[in-house]
Amino acid sequence: MFLNIFFLLAGFTFLILGGNWLLKAAVALSLRLQIPKIIIGMTVVSLATSAPELIVSVNAALKGTPILAMGNVIGSNIANLGLVLSITILLGRIDVEKDFYQINWPVLMVSSLVLFGVIYFDGILSSYEGLIMVLLLIFFLVYLVRFQKPAVVDEAPEDDMPLPVTKTVLYLIVGGVGLWGGSELLIKGAVALAEDFNVSQKIIALTVIAIGTSIPELAASVTAVLKKEKAISLGNLLGSNIFNILAVLGITSTITPIQVGKEFNDDLFWMIGISALLLPLVFFPKNMRLSFLEGIVLLIVYGLFVYFTVLS
């Protein structure tokens, strides 16, 4: 059992380090290619910060454990809003921008409902459905780049000077190896722990793995609050959830179909519910602001989700 816990912790460590290295390489490469910063923020940074979820889901699906792939994404999306966002606004309020209700929240709800529609009835996310989801993401990104004026806040701590080519390549290689190696250890430890404690892979995926792959977002959010910077906003977290659905599950299912049956039907309602809850929280009791009270509400909802997931 202790060896399996070690595998789990080592997997998380390599995923976090690998994702950070890949992020540095991706931003440096984009700057060297003179890609506009707004596009870096919307595409390169989003892809790099979602790399742990992507690699874990693809690897899990290829290893014949689709429950881990689907549970990772659904659990991460719930954790991003119920845990990461709640902790962030408990540490400091967030003034919500109007693009929340104009773009980000509607697209998140549409993405969540699309996932619900393709999974709830037949329990299969097929290759062509995954391809449609990837195309929807591309359409969304093109729309943002073409029509949105405000630049996305750079989540990377690096300056705008690109790294040397050798260091960029090194970060790229080491980051990729770290992500894949971390996913191997994480999946091995998670499956074994589920057997050790006689719990389902679904519970492990929705809680332990989901929280683990959300650690980069949590760390970035807490750091931003402590530094009194708005590097992580509600829009960034919503964007991460959109990317998890359309890119992570879309790419994974395009590579290999994900068959989970009715395992996640209830959890899909939790994911849609906590996303929908954001709308009234943003407008009440204080218009366009999330503060301590809303953080408590989100944390309670997440606690209830974990409680009923484990109880089930």
Image: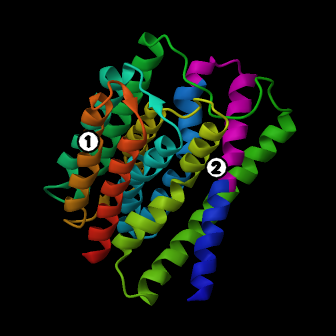
The residue sitting at 34% across, 40% down in the picture is: 131
- CB atoms of marks 1 and 2 within 8 Å: no
In-image side of 156 versus 69 (left or right): right
- What percent of the width, then of the height, locates residue 291? 42, 37
Please tell me whether residue 28 is drawn above or below residue 59 in the rendered image: above
Q: Looking at the rendered structure, which numbered label has been put on residue 277?
A: 1
Give the residue at the far left of this rendering. Answer: 121
- What percent of the width, then of the height, locates residue 92? 52, 38
Q: Would residue 44 be visible to someone looking at this image?
A: yes
- Image quadrant in which the N terminus is located: bottom right
Q: Is residue 170 magenta?
A: no
The residue sitting at 29% across, 63% down in the picture is: 304
Please tell me whether residue 60 is drawn above or below residue 227 in the rendered image: below
Q: Is residue 36 magenta?
A: yes
Label 1 amino acid?
Leu
Cα separation, mark 1 vs mark 2, equals: 30 Å
Mark 1 is surrounded, within 10 Å at the Cα level, by few (under 14), some (14 to 19) or many (20 or more) other residues, namely some
Label 2 amino acid?
Gly
Q: Considering depth in this image, is 63 or 24 the residue closer to the camera?
A: 24
- Image quadrant in which the C terminus is located: bottom left
Q: Looking at the rendered structure, which numbered label has been put on residue 19?
A: 2
